[in-house]
Amino acid sequence: MAVSAVESIAWTGDRLTVLDQRRVPDETVFLELRTIDGVIEAIASLAVRGANVLGSAGAFGYVLGVRAGLLPEDAAARVIAARPTAVNLRVAVQLAHAAQLRGEDPLDVALALLAEDRDACATIGQLGRQELAGASRLLTHCNTGALATTGRGTALGIVYAKAEAGEPVEVVATETRPLRQGARLTVWELQEAGIPVTLIVDAAAAAALTAGQVDAVVVGADRIAANGDTANKIGTLALAIAAKHAGIPFYVAATWNAIDPSTPDGAAIPIELRGAAEVIGTGDGAPAGDTAVWNPAFDVTPASLITGIVTERGVLHAPFGPAIAGLAR
């Protein structure tokens, strides 16, 4: 089994090289980002996406900002503001900023984050494989694999670990509206790896769950509150509700830096709203351009709907507040 060899992010001396994920799978195009403004634009436009990759990109963007003479505080604030929901971005930039204030090179922090993420994803894959032993038909949402991390992925990392161990595994991948990260990215990754994958539209997920076509749901996370409430790509909440109704376990897989102890619960998680154009589109059959649109990028799944949270420090179970506190260090 071969996970896609395409690296979504790399530092090449004086610039950040990123895979433009807006153009996958039709094209493999890399962007050469030499300025903090370029990094911010790539993050805001979703050329760079995936909670873990956002963190790494943000740290390198900060490096480019301070190298260009920006005040460290200004560089940090600008990068963090690019995507407010994903806590990995804030954590990574704050770590680089702290190094700068100590008189250290923030580039060392950014490079270390790349390596740490790879190791964390490998551990999540193995722990998730053990936790989900016997579950071979996994439903996932959005993209949480090699494109979204600097390793093999979080939720998809579990899939890859199962396949590598010779265990039967197949994936039901939601299309993931409005930008179709599941259809474009997850399906492509899994096909490249030779893992069976079936694509469904988001609206078919509840039917698949209640029809017994899925053994477990495994998704990623952009932020996990101190009580276990979890923000993830819009549509995740609907999956959790349907899984609960169908009696199917619902797991979140995320690196530890997605857990934000300063956010007490899901109500305190800022939810990014995106433009109407992502929903309305153009061409035949498109709604009128002045149609009112509500386009949240994320929703919050209450901890009460989550079976377990798989992190590199261990698998957490309810009550999540004490479980998170117990593994914090």
Image: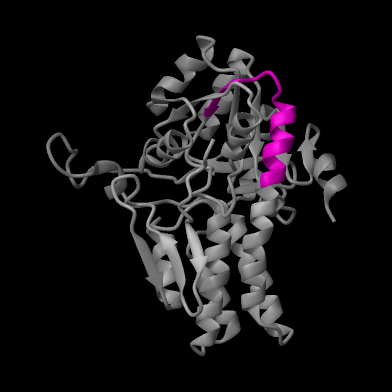
Q: In which quadrant will I find the N terminus?
A: top right
- Residue that lies at the very extreme toward the left in this rendered image: 284
Residue 54 position, x and y percent, is 53, 59
**Is residue 46 covered in magenta?**
no
What is the total number of numbered labels drawn onto the structure image? 0
- Residue that lies at the very extreme toward the right in this rendered image: 326
Q: In which quadrant will I find the C terminus?
A: bottom right
- Residue that lies at the very extreme toward the bottom in this rendered image: 69
Quarter-wise, where is residue 267 in the image?
Answer: top right
- Is residue 69 shown above or below 313? below
Residue 45 position, x and y percent, is 37, 59
Residue 150 position, x and y percent, is 57, 55
- Bounds of the magenta span? 122-139
Residue at x 57%, y 23% (from the top left corner):
169
20 on left or right of 91: left
**Is residue 133 covered in magenta?**
yes
Residue 141 position, x and y percent, is 50, 34
Q: How is the image coloured?
A: one colour
Residue at x 44%, y 30% (from the top left corner):
174
Residue 184 visible to the viewer = yes
284 on left or right of 137: left
Residue at x 53%, y 43% (from the top left corner):
145
Quarter-wise, where is residue 73 in the image?
Answer: bottom right
Frontmost residue, 102 versus 109: 109
- Is residue 243 shown above or below 272? above
Quarter-wise, where is residue 158 in the image?
Answer: top right
Residue at x 37%, y 66% (from the top left corner):
31
Residue 309 visible to the viewer = no
- Is residue 66 shown above or below 77? below
